[in-house]
Image: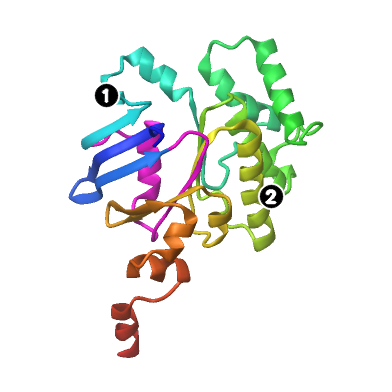
Amino acid sequence: MTEPLIELKGVVKRFGDNVVLNGVDLSLYRGEVTTIIGKSGTGKSVLLKHIIGLLVPDAGDIFFNGQNIQTLTREERRALKMKFSYMFQGNALFDSMTVYENVALPLKEKGRTPAPEIEEHVRDKLAQLDLSGIEDRYPSQLSGGMRKRVAMARSLVTDPEIVLFDEPTTGLDPIRKNASLAMITQYQKAYGFTAVLVSHEIPDVFYISQRIAMLDQGRIIFQGSPEAVQKSDLPLIQQFIRGQVPDNIRNALNEL
């Protein structure tokens, strides 16, 4: 079988007495869309931040292309982070900055890209996402769908190998939600990046993902294809994907 692009082994993360990740094992493969599902508050966003390097595990190891990232030099870690991009929940566009400034920000943060090259990259990416002509507008002047595409342009402007999406459809109506998921799969296929999503959109994400991982009580209790997760005989998985109420909660509600 193909070696994972990114692999987490026994990853633990605590915040005080709260153990959020309790021995996470997860494999992510090049060119695939992997969606991490699970109940709210189970640590999915914390897991994403470990993948991108924003958080360091208290125990366990994270490997990139088979190499333990803890063994990398500072320069090697900096180079590795440049391979990633992160599309935050709610887009996280800066209202005080124009579309051009928002999209150019990751390139400017590198500190090594000449201004003419930044402009070329930004205008090319805006054109590829059908956003030409709005460079001087502010996020408040755009529709929800256009803001999503601007956030996508900012995520892709550095030509990343891996893009992480934290609840990319939060707060969207069904039509815009489906459009956003379609946009992710469209650009993933076009640019070939490896995508990792955190999402509650069941079963919608099954149609755009090659792999599903379910996080529960700090551990990955399942990882496999969308078909496999739907056929899983684990009661917790079936309850989650079907939106069923567990028996203990149902009984408690009946007693009220």
Q: Position of residue 226 (x, y in %)?
A: 48, 56
Residue type pointed to by label 1: Gln
Residue sitting nearer the eye, 33 or 122: 33
Residue sitting nearer the eye, 67 or 129: 67
Hey, which quadrant is residue 93 in on the image? top right
Separation of marks 1 and 2 at Cα, in angstroms: 39 Å
Which residue is depicted at the point 38% across and 49% down?
44
Specify the label residue 79 is tagged with: none
Q: Position of residue 20 (x, y in %)?
A: 27, 50
Which residue is depicted at the point 29% across and 83% down?
252
Can residue 42 be seen in the rendering of this structure? yes
Q: Which residue is mark 1?
A: 70
Residue extending farthest to the front is 1
Can residue 135 be seen in the rendering of this structure? no
At numbered mark 1, what does the secondary structure look like: helix, strand or loop? helix
Which residue is depicted at the point 33% across and 26% down?
66
The number of numbered discs placed on residues in the rendered structure image is: 2
**Highlighted range, magenta:** 29-57
Q: Which residue is mark 2?
A: 144
Q: Is residue 154 magenta?
A: no
Lateral position of residue 178 relative to residue 27, left or right: right
Q: Is residue 50 magenta?
A: yes
Residue 164 vertical placement versus 221 (above, below) = above
Q: Residues within 10 Å of mark 2 (few under 14, many from 20)?
A: some
Which residue is depicted at the point 51% across and 40% down?
32
Q: Residues within 10 Å of mark 1 (few under 14, many from 20)?
A: few
Are the residues at dot 1 and dot 2 in contact (C-beta closer than 8 Å)? no
